[in-house]
Every structure is written in C-alpha cells, then in structure tokens.
Amino acid sequence: MTARLVFDVAAGLAILFAAVMVVHRHPVKSVLALVVSFFALSVAYVMLSAPLIAALQVIVYAGAILVLFLFVLMLLNVPEEVRQKSGRPIHHTLSALAIVVFAAVLLGALRAHGATNAAPSTSPLTGEVAPVARLLFSEHLLSFEALSILLLAALVGAFALARREGRT
Amino acid sequence: MSLADVGFVLLRVLGPVLVILLILPIPMWVERRGAALIQDRPGPNRVGPFGLLQPLADAVKFFMKEDIVPANADRFLYVIAPGIAVFSAMTTFAVIPYGATATIAGREVPLIGADVSIGILYLFALTSLSVYGIVLAGWSSNNKFSLIGGIRSSAQIISYELAMTTAAAGVILVAGSFRLTDVVAMQSGTWFGFLPRWNVFPQFLGFVVFYVATFAETNRVPFDLPEAEAELVGGYHTEYSSMKFAMFFMAEYINMIVASALTVTLFFGGWTLPGFHPEGLGGVLLSVVIFAAKTAFFVWVFIWVRWTLPRFRYDQLMRLGWKALLPLALVNLLSTAALVVWGVL
Amino acid sequence: MTANGIPLGDVLLASGALFALGLAGALMRRNAISIFLAIELMMNSANLAILGYASTLQSVEGQIVVFFVIAIAAAEAAVGLAIFVAMFRHTETIDVNRINLLKW
C-alpha cells in the first residue's frame, strides 16, 4: 500500500514538474523543472524494483545530460521566449488537435491493456544489482560493446561538430 | 513497523547528520589553528582559551551580517542554490557505514543510514546533483566572475567525477557488490598475519587517484581555483553574504568530512581493525570511535594540504584530471581485474 | 499488478501523461533546445512504461533495455547539442522558425 502511495506521489510530482517545464518560457528554469521531474521519476523507478536504473537516471540523465543542456543554454545566453502573436494560428490549432487525438488514443489503448501471457524470466525481480549485471555481461555483451563504440562515435562527432573552424 | 522500529531508523539516520552538524565547529577551529601552525603564527587566540570559541564568533558574525540579494539576480535560484549544495552534502552520508551492527533491545540496528543495494552509486548520484548548486549560484548572481567561477567549478567536478568513479570501480570489483557494508566486511582480517586487508595496499594507485579526485570534488586546494580570492574575486560565492555564504561554507566542510569518510570506507577498512571483533554495545561504540578517528585523520590531511600546496591553474587542473588521473584509474581497474581473475584478490 | 503492488494502469497512465506533455512541448516551443528537452521527456516516459511492464512480468531484461535507452539518449544529447552550438555560430539564433535556410 505504501509503495503505491509513494509511486503515485512521485509520478504526480514528475508530471507536475514536466508541465512546468513545458509551460515555462525561460529555458534555464524549464531545464531545472525537468531536473526535479527526473529526480521524481527516479523515485518512481525505485518503487518499480529498479534501483540501478534509478541511480543511473540521476547520475546520467539528471546529473550529466541536463548539466550539459544547462551549460549550452548559459553559454549561448538563450533569451526568454517572448509570447508573440503567431501569424499562423493554424500551427497552434493543429498542434493542440494532434495532442488531444494522441491522448485519446493512448487512453483508449490503456483501457484495453492486459499483461501478456509471457513466461516469467528465470531471474525474478529483487532490488539487487547482480542479476542485471550478470545478464548484461553475458547475453547482451555484444550490444554493450556496440554501445560503447556508439558513445565513442558520439564523443568524436560532438567534438568535430562543435569546434571552431580552422583549428586542428 | 512499530514505533520502536521507526525510532531506531530515525536514530541511525539522524544520528550521524546531527553529529556532523554539531562537530562542524571542530574542523573550522582546526583549520584556523592548523593554518597558523603551518604558517608559523599564533592564529586565533583571543576568543576563549586557544581560540576555541572562534567558530562561535564566526557563527554570530554570519547571523548578524546583512543579507544581500543583488539587484538583477534571479531571486529564486539565488536563494535555492546554497540549499541544494548543503542538501546534497548532507544526504551523501546516508550510505556510509559508521560502525558495527549494534544489538539494542533485542533487535539488530545496523549503523548505516540506509543499506541500499546500490550503495556507492547513490553517493555518486548525489555528487552529480551538487553540481547544480554551484552552477546555479554562479549563474543566478548576475556577475561575470561568479558565472565563470561556477562553470569552471562544475566542469572541474564533472571531470574528476570520472576519475573518482573509475578508481572506486576497482574497489567495487574486488568486493563484488555496491554496498559499502560489503566493502567494509571484505576488508576485515589480515594478510600474512600482520598486514590489514585494506584496499589501499593492493590498489595503492587507485587510492591515490581517488584521494586526489576528492580534493577536486570538494573544491579544496590545490583545486580551488573556482573559489579563489586572488583569481576570481570569490568565484561562485562572490555575491553571497551572511547565512547563504555560511551554508556554502558548511557544505564545503561537510563535503570534506564525507569525502574523508568515503576514502576510509573504500580503502582503509571503515570501522574495522585487524583482530578487532566488536562485542556488545562497548564494541560497537569502539568501532564508531575507530571510524571517527580514521576520518578525522583524513580531514586533517585535507587541511594540511590546503596550507602547504600552491593552487593549480585551471588548464593544468583539467589536463591533470583527463590526461593523468583518468588513464591511471583505468590502469588500476585493469590490473585489479587481472588480479581478481587470477584469484589473487 | 507490478511486483510491489503498484497497479500497471497507474504506471501506464503516468507514462502516457508524460509522453503527451513531451509531445506538447515539442510541438509548441520555438526554441530548439526546449524542443530537444521535450523529446528527452518523451524518452523518459517510454522508460517508465518499460520498467512498469518489466516489474509486472518479473523480467530483468526490461531494466537492461532501459539501461541502453539511457546511454543512447546521452549520446544523442551530446551530438544534438553540438549541432545546436554549431548552428548558433552560423545563424546567431536557435529559434526554429528562423532557421529555414533549406527553404527558398
């Protein structure tokens, strides 16, 4: 019972701060709202018996990716978005329509959901890290190594894109 | 969960937090007198015997100073930044075991805030969050020096985090678990009958990398360029006064204590000593005292280094972190992995 | 019902709400970096749904998938922000309405 309560509160906070992120016009404040939202999501992950993912969410997502966003925003000195009269109101109407249709479809799909009859995996879910690690380094080793090469490619690519012209 | 259970949980969680807050004046006093000792001068000796009440005078000063918010500063972020710094500093202590498991009134009370399965990862997560306190302080002050100081400091923390976690990975590899209680338990006993089984002996390189990285993580000399008075006015806490500055000050000391506690836990056996088996409440208290003594020694080393070494320039600092410490930490990790595979460790 | 007694419907509802908010942000904002943030939010909502199902089906593979998603999102964020920085250097703006050089 308490697990459900904590999850509901955490998910509620995540949704609330995500809404703040979407609505707020100042980009730095909206990044910070997203940080809080990701922190709340991390708590929700812990409730779903995934403490490793929760820790990684805070370390990688909230603690590295969003810090990178914050740096770029500060260094580019991105200004507050000015609420202006759009010359093409059809853009807003179509966006709102798309979101409403999507939400309706999603709720309809949720209504018809049901857990599939898949056989449970051999390693039942405890809050331990060892089963995840064991699986990661045995069955999914190739993907793991490919991921590390992907990260290397991203590192080199980001460096090549963002450096100033004419410098080796 | 009876009331007694809740009481014990509160005791073991709040206990170290309150103790740390209460003993904060001690590192402050030791810093001032220790600096004086190293610099061959008397140091504070007016306020109370041997200047022991100096931290109290400092606290009164912090309360009495005018609390300024700069004109064009972002008010909300400006006020919340020191709070984030202190919050992340204090909550990191939750996963560090500070004593043996006590048996009070028939129930086992492990002397650790929360023995989560992700142990040390929780600590790294909170260190990542402390970056926000600094970068927000720098940006919201609406001051060029603060911004530069804040960005330099956060870049420094992120860079040295890598070396720190890779060095810690060597310890985790040998322990086979993220839980710090497992790491401490693995370090009990001796090799050859006299050498304690501490991780500092087989992984000395890892210890050196880790300890140097903690200096950078806590923004202490020789890595304190982002807050150095001579370089950047005051870095990210230029515009802070009174209680908000006191909070940054507190956060720095708490970070120092936590970093020392973590070094002791990972590399020096935590609360264990070879040949020491805690029995009863006296044994548990002795284990806490042992832990506190080891941590206090490393806090003294922090202070000692501050008043001995000159400061790194920023580019030297970044070069050290990326080109020296990270490769060394990787070498340590690989050699430790080899030793584990060959069954030596 | 997930492992801890959290109904799967709760998890999916939260995930759906987050995804809708992310979609709204991606469609409504003018700032390229804010659009990117909304996309990151959408990826997190997918992570939440995957973990909800993983908990229901007592499967650890779900956590592995989310691990990969987080790592790939990190790589994508790095490259995307590098593109934005390069773009900003050329055009002095990151307003997506004004970056329309491909259109004559």
Image (tube, rainbow, N blue to C red):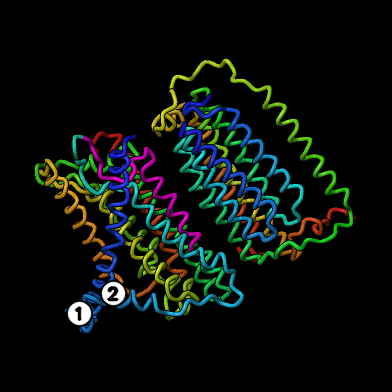
Please give the residue where the numbered disc 1 appears in the rendered image: B48
- Above or below residue A160? Residue C64 is above
Residue A29 % position (x, y): 62, 59
- Above or below residue A51? Residue B324 is below
Q: Which mark is residue B56?
A: 2
The answer for which chain carries disc 2 is: B
Of the 4 image quadrants, the one containing the C terminus of chain A is bottom right
The answer for which chain carries disc 1 is: B
Q: Which mark is residue C52?
A: none
- Whether B206 is among the magenta residues is no
What residue do we see at 18% from left, 46% from top? B272
**Secondary structure under the numbered disc 1 in the rendered image:** loop
**Secondary structure under the numbered disc 2 in the rendered image:** helix
Local packing at callout 2 (Cα closer than 10 Å; few below 14, some 14-19, many 20+) is: some
Q: Earlier in the sequence, mark 2 or mark 1?
A: 1
| Extent of the magenta region | B107-133
What residue do we see at 53% from left, 24% from top? C1
Is residue C94 at all visible to an observer of this figure?
Answer: yes
Local packing at callout 1 (Cα closer than 10 Å; few below 14, some 14-19, many 20+) is: few
Which residue appears farthest toward the front when viewing the image?
B3
- Residue B103 location, quadrant: top left
Q: Count up the numbered dots.
A: 2
- Residue A115 location, quadrant: top right
Give the amino acid type for the residue marked by disc 2 in the picture. Leu
Along the line of sight, the residue nearer the viewer: C53 or B269: C53
Give the amino acid type for the residue marked by disc 1 in the picture. Gly
What residue do we see at 28% from left, 71% from top? B28
What residue do we see at 70% from left, 40% from top? C20
